[in-house]
Image (tube, coloured by chain):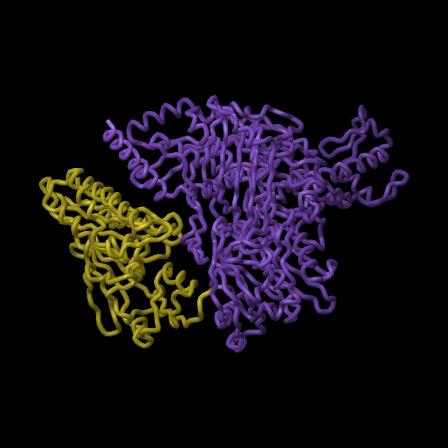
Amino acid sequence: MAVTTFGESVKRTEDPRLITGRGKYVDDIRLSGMAHMAFVRSPYGHANIKNIDTSAALDSPGVIAVFTGADLQEELGGLPVGWMLPDLKQPPHPPLAFETVRYLGDAVAVVVADTAYQATDAAGLVEVDYEVLPAVVNAEAATKDGAPQLHQEAPNNVGFDWEVAGGDYAEAIKDPDVIVVKERIVNQRLIPNSMETRGVVADYDAGKGNITLYTSTQIPHLVKLLFSLVTGWPEQKVRVVAPDVGGGFGSKLYLYAEEVVAGIVARQVKRPVKWIESRSEAYVSTAHGRDHICDAEIAGKKDGEIVGIKVNLYANLGAYLSTFAPLIPTYLFGLMLGGVYKMPNVECKVHGVFTNTTPVDAYRGAGRPEAAYLVERMVSRFAQEIGRDPIAVRRKNMLAAHKNGRAVTTGVMYDSGDYKANLNKALEIFDYPAFRKEQREARREGKLLGVGISTYIEICGMAPSAVASSLGAGAGLWESSNVRLHPTGKATIYIGTSPHGQGHETTMAQLVSSEIGIPIEDVEVLHGDTDQGQFGTGTFGSRSLAVGGAALFNSLQKVKAKTHRLASHLLEADPKFVTFENGTFSVEDIPDKTLTIQEVAGQAYAAANLPPGMEPGLEEVSFFDPQNFAWPNGTHLCVVEIDPDSGQVKVQRYVAVDDFGNVLNPMIVDGMTHGGVAQGIGQALSEQAVYSDDGQLLSGSLMDYALPSADMFPMMELDRTVTPSPSNPIGVKGAGEAGTIAASPAVMNAVIDALAHLGVKHMDMPATSEKVWRAIEDAKEARRAARSAARARG
Amino acid sequence: MVTSSFDYFAPTTLDEATSLLSRYRGEAKVLAGGHSLIPMMKLRLAEPGILVDIGQIDGLSYIREDGDGVSIGSMTTYREMATSSVIQSRYPLLADASSKVADLQVRNRGTIGGSLAHSDPAGDIPAVVLAIGGSVVARTRRSSREIAIDRFQVDLLTTALHDNEIITEIKLPSLAAGTGTAYSKFHNPASHYAITGVAAVVTISGGVCTEARVAVTGAGDKATRARRTERILRGKELTPAVIRRAAERAAAEVEDTLNEDIHATAEYRVHMTQVHAVKAIEAAVAAAG
């Protein structure tokens, strides 16, 4: 029995259950009489549905029903958008398409059968007569005249035009001393690969008219709300349960078609129904991430002073607006374009564009990786252009340290940070001068070594609800908690955010233990069941501790206040002289007058001797809405070696110094950083979703989509600085996404650094072997051509 | 994904298995380790009505020194080959290639017979066995025959095997004194199959290459001997210059059937085949030492 402390690396209490196969995921749920669903999906990127013949499927063994989009058009409604932008085009998004399919994998019908095998076999027998239409998959191309049109509501396929600006970039570059460096920066499309794919079980109670959805989601409470809004099902009759969830990375942060269909189909067939997504299905039906085409400019002077950045972005939305799609490439991208720099002038235009591809939404980092990649790549590109060291240029432009709010050009207020401290600490660990020497020697031997840096900042801890609402949020972004101390002094806590790998059961219990001094084993953490727990917005945007943890902290303060008052009463002492430490109330200077919090809890329920006016029981609720976001930041350094024969990039070294504010559980934070960095390296070196021009997904399985594997990573060297965040009472920031945000620019800057002496200036991710080999060959060719041109002149 | 439905047989004797293949000829597929066939079935690229699982038959998994050479039972797994002292000492490239197939889970299940019968254009084992030489023993219900490895790989995913035959054994010849071997592979970052792989078996006598067998996988439609490379090597002292010149021809035999996909263009495959031909031949020469 251990009381834990804030800052202790408590081992994850959920792991024994999860790693020995005793977790309970959606697919582990088996209800009596449960039927299975399989979806019929479009094999084309764009087509009209001329006819659907379900007769052969209906005759197939075990089949209970087949529904097409037209059959359920009324009941299903349309999928919602959770974030508004000015003049946002919102074309209807039917959960089952009934006139036109707009991306490969768009669902057109659902088969219900006794077994999953029967449902899948029968789905193959549904005959859909398609009229194939021209498709467009590239966001920039989709806006051009003559491009195939997806929605009549969105002329030229433009869903929105959005902009943010600060200072006056156009004026700033009129200065004759200012050099403007332009680059086209493509941030490729990624496919999320959570270990557990999506899945849903819908259980309809015909007697009460209630529906329970067990779904693999990051946002059970929002699924309940949105499901109710979409289908008109009274909210009090909807229960959503997120059981153990095996990862999400943002991809389980939306209301999906399959969740809505499952609820409606369960009511239609009057049996529980289950759908478990296959990996191949996940590749086309679960939201993708990134996919930016960006024309970027950075402007500055020869001495390294940066005067501004300008961006024109085509953000691929996919075929429909996913729940948070309008938010990701706008506020979460554009507001971050100042980085950790003074950056006095920022100009950013974003065009959200519909294409015949799987919808695009948040993916680990969501907008900030795209922004950090662009800013950090452009700063290094600028340093290369003016012939200065990329670290010296960063240092020259970096914001000064601040503890409580620093307004920046894009209009937001960074909370706290000491950016140069991160940089200095990272450089000290790394030994930069020694590396540059090693690099010079390596080049003499024909080896290609490079170092890359990224001094990132990101926005998390979503969010002050009033701010978010003014920017377009469709829901409040606070969190809540309920702490119930039982008569025995054990605790059950109910939290609104539910984990999908982050370790909430450990960290939230750790916070309880460290605050009120009861052993961590005595704390049960309940989450994810909308009938059981507190309402909450969900787990995303590195917010669970900064917002949900803060709500829990506040409930615990209320528990402390009430028990303090009750203990003082029972000890017959003036509260002023009653202290609380390690779970025990004592009276100053009277050593034998003590009460444990467990004893006080018992008295709270016995209610035999309560102070005047005190209610019995011991249960406290808090809602926490932060005043500002939280802003993790740091410096990451990466060394790569490139094999000149193959172009293969190997990450040799990785140093990360991050400021996550106060750290509750360093082990979990390190693990998040490891995973985040790995994901960033994956984007930099191997991952890419590739569509053919007609909308076929060429990287449609793990055989072709190159997730990074363990052999691609060195042992990461992690360290931290701490500037407590003033945005919440526990001073924490967020650690879930920072590694991903920082890593891809660090790696790509290293790749370019390794090739810079050959004349290479930019390369798009992923830096695959062939791409790097071609860059080397092209650089050689360019040098040969330059030499012969010089000879011809001479 | 789930497979389409099929009937499953798990015979315990070869006679039973070959009888099933004859009875359901054309309809039945042999299931060995299942690491090529099952994924294809799950994607419904293969929909056999009948599976004959030969995993329950005793006596198909062995590595045996027979006379001069070595015989390997068809159900011998990659892992068994990678860790066999006989294979490590007599055919180091086979042990090495086996240790580099996919991941441990696959190596524990995948078999030499399955790999050869499937003849994946990017499989490792077909090129390695081609470079070693030897033969494949195939049995029907009534008869048994030995197919020389050079005649075994016929086309993309196609071998000389008849659909009523089961591979029972792979016979490898003894390698002459002074022979070195090596396999060098450049793998697809997603699937870990070979984008290109080069197997080299080189015999050096009196400072001169007396025999060379070089085979390429991944680049073309099937594992293929690089005969032009071999001809340049034979009869010469294998200096770096000679090896480089020979390696430049390593993709010559597959140039009409070059693969091209989102991971590597044909041009890059040719280049990497040459790069890995140098690596494999140099390593084989060093091992021949």
Whole-percent x and y of residue A387? 41, 25
As rendered, which of A684 and A587 lies closer to the eye?
A684
The residue lying at 65 percent from left, 41 percent from top is A462
Q: Indicate the colour of chain A.
A: purple
Whether residue A220 sits left or right of residue B98 in the image: it is right
Q: Percent x, y for residue A625?
A: 72, 40
Q: Is residue A671 visible?
A: no
Q: Quadrant of residue A575 in the image?
A: top right
Question: Chain B is shown in which shade?
Answer: yellow
The residue shown at (38%, 54%) is B106
- Looking at this view, is A512 or A684 the one in front? A684
Question: Can you tell which quarter of the image residue A452 is in?
Answer: top left
Q: Quadrant of the N terminus of chain A?
A: top right
Query: Which of the image's four quarters has the C terminus of chain A?
Result: top left
Q: How many marks?
A: 0
Viewer-proximal residue, A312 or B72?
A: A312
B141 shown above or below B62: below
B12 on left or right of A97: left
Give the answer, above or below, for where A364 lies relative to A421.
below
In the rendered image, residue B288, in percent from the top left (x then y), is placed at 17, 42
On screen, residue A202 versus residue B46, left or right, reads right
**Would residue A44 be visible to someone looking at this image?**
yes
Q: Is residue A313 left or right of residue A583?
A: left
Placement of A323 over or under A165, stated as above or below: below
Specify the quadrant of the image occupied by residue A329. Answer: top right
Which residue is situated farthest in the right direction here? A612
Q: Residue, x 65% and y 62% (percent of image)?
A: A77
Report x, y in % for residue A209.
72, 66
